[in-house]
Image (spheres, helix red, strand yellow):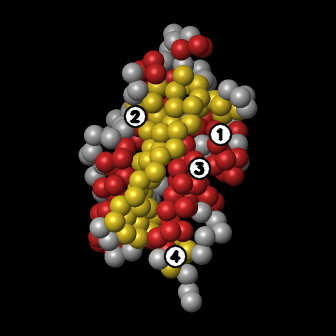
């Protein structure tokens, strides 16, 4: 029997790499929204990560009839009262890039001392199949550096330090990052949900 298909409800190529690595070994063909020009952008207008993840997964599952998996991720910085949080992708404005977001973050944290630069990534993954919706979450604690380090990863990874490893996410391979990251944790839970869905 040909493998069944799971639609990744994202066009973010960096996320697609990490999700594909973490779901390796499942008997599923992974396709992403990037392969379907006709799929519209889903506006991320919900007040929290779960709301946006569910909206992205449900919208794409309805449009395509496929089972859809969506990821919504935020960086919560304690000294900024949890910002940028749900606004992480547009932190530096509507034309934000990874680099401009990192620059704004470092500017906003200027003068904040080492012990007060704690932060966490939170990732909510929603899986929608017809009207059936499941959500899982992963959280990874770290510290925001004063300058970027490392060339791998994406987004805020070069300034997000894992204190125990003394490395930023941008100094880890995809597999190493997935082993500890918010997304890796959420995807290990998502794997169990997917095994259950696609077996029944
Ligand atoms: P989709 O909604 O299409 O999945 P997006 O880039 O808009 O893609 P999010 O809203 O979930 O995704 O992500 C918000 C931003 O947070 C993202 O643009 C990155 O800048 C950052 N981000 C997400 N995951 C990250 C990670 O694992 N490491 C570093 N930064 C990350």
Looking at the rendered structure, the secondary structure element under dot 4 is helix
Q: Earlier in the sequence, mark 1 or mark 3?
A: 1
Residue 148, given in percent of the width and then of the height, sits at 62, 29
User: Are the residues tagged 1 and 3 within 8 Å (C-beta)?
Assistant: no
Say whether residue 187 is left or right of residue 77.
Answer: right
Quarter of the N terminus within the rendering = bottom right
Q: Residue at 56% of width from left, 10% of height from top?
A: 113
Q: Earlier in the sequence, mark 4 or mark 3?
A: 3
Looking at the rendered structure, the secondary structure element under dot 2 is strand
Q: Earlier in the sequence, mark 2 or mark 3?
A: 2
Q: Nearer the viewer, mark 2 or mark 3?
A: 3
Q: Residue at 44% of width from left, 47% of height from top?
A: 124
Residue 37, given in percent of the width and then of the height, sits at 37, 70
Q: Nearer the viewer, mark 2 or mark 1?
A: 2
Q: Check disc 4 and report the residue beneath it.
A: 199
Q: Earlier in the sequence, mark 4 or mark 1?
A: 1
Work out whether residue 9 can be spotted: no
Looking at the rendered structure, the secondary structure element under dot 1 is helix
Which of these two is toward me, 7 or 103?
7
User: Are the residues tagged 4 and 3 within 8 Å (C-beta)?
Assistant: no
Find out if the beta carbon at label 4 lies less than 8 Å from the nearest ligand 1 atom.
no
Is residue 17 positioned above or below 121 on the image?
below
């Amino acid at each position: 029997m040909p493998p069944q298909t799971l639609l990744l409800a994202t066009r973010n190529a960096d996320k697609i790499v990490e999700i594909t690595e973490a779901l390796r070994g499942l008997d599923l063909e992974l396709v992403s929204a990037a392969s379907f020009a006709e799929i519209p952008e889903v506006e991320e207008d919900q007040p929290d990560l779960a709301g946006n993840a569910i909206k992205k997964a449900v919208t794409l599952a309805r449009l395509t009839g496929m089972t859809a998996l969506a990821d919504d991720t935020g960086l919560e910085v304690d000294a900024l009262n949890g910002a940028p949080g749900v606004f992480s992708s547009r932190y530096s404005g509507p034309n934000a890039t990874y680099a401009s977001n990192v620059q704004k973050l470092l500017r906003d944290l200027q003068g904040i001392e080492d012990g007060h630069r704690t932060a966490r990534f939170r990732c909510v993954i929603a899986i929608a199949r017809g009207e059936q919706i499941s959500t899982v979450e992963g959280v990874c604690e770290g510290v925001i550096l004063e300058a970027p380090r490392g060339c791998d990863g994406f987004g805020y990874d070069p300034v997000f330090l894992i204190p125990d490893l003394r490395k930023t996410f941008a100094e880890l391979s995809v597999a190493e990052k997935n082993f500890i990251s918010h997304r890796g944790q959420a995807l290990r839970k998502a794997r169990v949900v997917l095994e259950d869905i696609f077996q029944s």
